Amino acid sequence: MSQTESTCISNIQNNKSNALSPSKLIWRRFRRNKIAMVSLVILILMVILTALAPVLATHGRDTLSLGLKEKPPSAENWLGTDALGRDIYTRLLYGGRISLSVGLVATAIQLFIGIIMGSLAGYYGRFVDTLIMRITDMVLSFPFLALAIVMAAILGPSIYNTMLIIGLLSWTSTCRIIRGQFLSIKQTEYMEAAHALGLSELRIIRRHMLPNAMAPLLINATLAMASAILIEAGLSFLGLGVQLPTPSWGNMLEAARNMRYIMHSWWLWLPPGLCIFLAVLSINLIGDGLRDAFDPRLKQ
Amino acid sequence: MRQYLLRRLLQVIPTLLGITVIVYLIINAAPGSPVSGMIDPTITGEALEIRKQQLGLDKPVYYRYGIWLSELVTEGNLGYSTRTRRPVAEMIQSRLGPTLLLTMSSMILSFIIAVPIGVLSATRQYSRLDYFFTVFAIAGVSIPVFFLGVAMIKIFAFDLRLFPVGGMSTAGAYYSSWLQQAADILKHLFLPLIVLSCAQVAMFVRYTRSSMLEVVRQDYVRTARAKGLSERVVIYKHALRNALIPVITVLGLSLPFLFSGAILTEAVFAWPGMGTLNITAVTTRDYPLLMGINLFLALIVILGNLLADIFYAVADPRIRFD
């Protein structure tokens, strides 16, 4: 080994120690995005507040006080009370737990289905691909909410069914993304190397293909979570999602189906509505920030 | 071209069939027999078996699906509502007009509003205006439709009294001319239209912007500039035309989203369309009606996408041989 060569190698080794890993690089770019960072802080704050609901609540979640029906905000009830005299501020905290976790679990379900279906379609191609893509076409043809309403009516509305329905109906975008990524990854040389090494198909998919499809997957998952929260709210608003007395931001808004409340009792529907809006907006903005951080070229 | 159209048309058939299968299976999963309303609850034993045979309920699922499908295709029979006993097809037909009025006017309005904003955003990329519109667009898809609707009712219907609270026409109104009637409907349409269009505008703005950004980087746009054409002509005449082609597909793809939004909007504004019908059907557990509505909406979506694809092929000769 010549002198220059060894210096070269040692240089490379030195560089390695202070080189940034991809995830650090992405975090660095993400941090520069002010809007996305503010959204992240808001979201974390919301998660902390709802997680600490039992500590922060001023009343019992379902405590009725019929003498205090539909009271406007006061020192006693910070955000007023609902039609049954329950404290809105307290229910808002507990409702956030439900709404956020429905969003999270529904996203996990759709990722699970979408990744499996997308991997099958993208990896095996041919007949499997055609079949799976036809199925996604079919699922995509139904207006989401119309089919979700029927499924909720048949399965019976509950928190778990709401998670399940949203997951079962929204895996198609994940599937399409994974499939598209796999189709291009299949052409790469490292795939050829993986095959030459005689790795099993599952290992190739798990260790070599999926990690390379991570960027669009993560962005998609963020946006999917935002829409899952919106759909839960929509279903609960129609009385087909989370059932009372368990509060969710969506079913708190059910009160707004009553014209009298819209007119006279803004505190019944404005706070939960704003919470949904704020949560979904910050998740969407984080997703947008991630897109820019992952691939500055995509910022078009 | 003809080959492309033919192939695209043939592709629709398996999708349609698959949709009818999904719809039929879901009907079957519904608790209670879908025709329990047709059987006298007092009869039992042998008489019940005979009645079931008459109705074909003793046959396996795939056999019943075959009958259902053939009646659907040949006679347009979507079954009968368990609540009103009227044919589902007839009930849907009576609600189709208001829903199409709401959704199609929303689509047109959103397109008209979104395209100029998208172009403006793209031509001034990274400007303050662009940032504003980008955040605005994300906010537009983040606000729950029904919450926006309720807030609009509170502000514009109750507080300012500018528009009616809901419905499609003033109850008991007498119109001396069709013009007056149209004005009344328009007045009722305004708020739901704005609410439904909000998310659509947001979506179209994003697509127009990114499509426009891609096009303005192309050589022919540089050529147009090099020829000394004014920026206005370059953008609006040369670039926009090509930038709008992918947006057409997005119009088609946004249809399911549009109808989902319409269900909530109709619920908030008591708009007498298919969304309201859908919700009534759920509360009365009217499964044949529910499935009829779903099948019908899916059909509209598929036809809409087909139209968008055909239009795309006509507008863009490059994809003909795909």
Image (cartoon, helix red, strand yellow):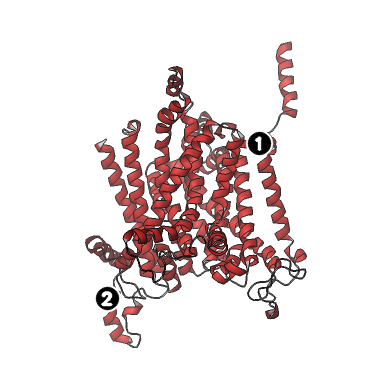
Q: Amino acid at mark 2?
A: Leu
Residue B55 is tagged as: 2
Q: Where does label 1 land, which residue?
A: A26
Residue B83 at x, y percent in the picture? 37, 76
In the picture, the quarter occupied by the C terminus of chain A is top right
Disc 2 sits on a residue from what chain? B
Task: For residue A150, say whether it is visible.
Answer: yes
Task: For residue B24, say whether it is visible.
Answer: no
Q: Amino acid at mark 1?
A: Ile
Q: Is residue B2 left or right of residue A97?
A: left
Discs 1 and 2 lie in a common subunit: no
Determine which quarter of the picture holds residue A103: bottom right
Residue B266 at x, y percent in the picture? 45, 62
Q: Dot 2: what SS?
A: helix
State the separation of the CA atoms marked 1 and 2: 63 Å
Q: Is residue A15 left or right of residue A167?
A: right
Farthest residue toward the bottom?
B42
Residue at 42%, 73% (x, y): give it. B285
Farthest residue toward the left?
B74
Residue at 36%, 58% (x, y): give it. B182
Question: Total marks drawn?
Answer: 2
Q: Dot 1: what SS?
A: helix
Residue B243 at x, y percent in the picture? 43, 34
Residue at 53%, 53% (x, y): give it. A110
Residue A170 at x, y percent in the picture? 49, 53
Q: Residues within 10 Å of mark 2 (few under 14, many from 20)?
A: some
Foreground of the two, B85 or B179: B179
